[in-house]
Amino acid sequence: MISTDSTPTLVAVDGTRALALYSHGPEPSSTHDPVVVFVSGVASSSLNWAAVVRQLSSSMRCYTYDRAGYRHSDISPHPPTAQNIAQDLRHLVENAPITNPLILVGHSWAGVLINEFIALTGNGNHIAGLVLVDANHESMPQVLNVNDPDLQVVSEGIDPYIAKGLAEEHKMTQAEWDALMADESTEKYATIARLEDEQYAVSFETLRSKRLDQQQPLLGGKPVYVIGGMRSRDWNGMYNAGIARGNGSEDQRTRVRALISTADEKSESIQKRHLELSTKGKLVFARESGHFVQMTQPELIVKGVEWVVNCLNCM
């Protein structure tokens, strides 16, 4: 039996370790009703979905989970590659079990993780649709390098939650925010975040090697809702905080300003690529958010899930 609310169920994934799974909201009334599974970005706690879960779980069953190494989940002996994370997700869904069709809601690196999950499991009845939240595409490093070395120098020593305005603009309750901050201040979190960061860059090349772009639309006509954030909002905040701290040479600052000036245009081109996944897609933009749309405009993600459900009801 899957637990509800904040108490996790520990689900065995390979016989030697378990992942923590949390269920929220009412049980599905039918085996055909879709359920939502949230997939977090790189080095991100599942708690950053709290505002979305709070709003969405009043009407449908939602699941969050701690990836290997996070919070209540065991540490994996395997490196947290995108392929290994996708394999863990497969085992989690199968062993919990979650038998209803899945609406996968993924943020940031989850764009890569979900594509690896599709490559691993195929486009079966287990997938109902997707909501991609400012998600990474396999082509992203070739278009927009979020780990640009000049940007990193200018941003050195800056608290990203403060510089990006998330600490003030988030729509989480105080208890939800405090829980997220507490989780991301632990040594366990710091360890897995570092390990995931080490796997981030290579994951794009690994996914591209599968040549999924030649098999589109991977999801046929299943609904795919894409939400793009405004990268320039985040990077402007980081830039201004870095300048106030005296970071970067004049040349580095000039290059970062140029990077910021084209960030949203390049990001939009990346988000459009996700629409290739299906013949049924919709693209919207979170104009009042940076990268972490789930924290600042959670209602847009709720609308995305509702759009997917409505599409499914019309099929």
Image: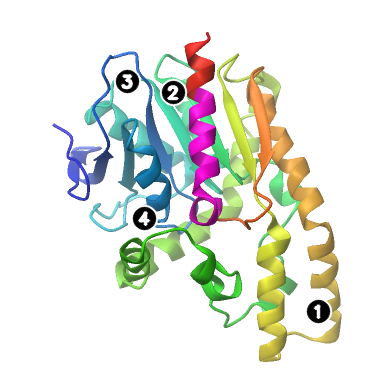
- Give the CA distance from mark 2 to mark 1: 45 Å
The residue tagged 4 is: 47
The CA distance from mark 1 to mark 3 is: 50 Å
Q: Residue at x 25, y 37 (%)?
A: 13
Which mark lies nearer to you, 4 or 1?
A: 4
> Is residue 221 in sight in this rendering?
yes
Tell us which disc is closer to us: 3 or 2. Answer: 3
Sequence order check, earlier mark of 1 and 3: 3
Are dots 4 and 1 in contact, CB under 8 Å?
no
Q: Amino acid at mark 1?
A: Arg
Q: Nearer the viewer, residue 192 or 221?
A: 221
Residue 121, numbered label: 2
Tell me which segment is drawn in magenta: 293-308
Asked whether residue 255 is drawn in magenta, I would say: no
| Left or right of residue 310: residue 262 | right
User: Marks 4 and 3, Cα distance to the nearest angstrom?
Assistant: 23 Å
Report the number of discs.
Answer: 4
> Residue furthest toward the top?
315
Dot 1 alpha-carbon crowd within 10 angstroms: few under 14, some 14 to 19, many 20 or more? some
For marks 4 and 1, give the CA distance: 34 Å
C-alpha span from label 3 to label 2: 15 Å
Amino acid type at mark 3: Asn
**Which mark sits nearer the N-terminus, 3 or 2?**
3
**Residue 315 x %, y %:** 52, 8
State yes or no: residue 294 in magenta. yes
Percent of width and height locating residue 203:
57, 46
Q: Which residue is mark 3?
A: 100
* Amino acid found under the numbered disc labelled 4: Leu
Quarter of the image where the N terminus is located = top left
Q: Which residue is mark 1?
A: 253
Q: Report helix, strand or loop for mark 3.
A: loop
Query: Pointer 3: residues within 10 angstroms few (<14), some, or many (20+)?
Result: some
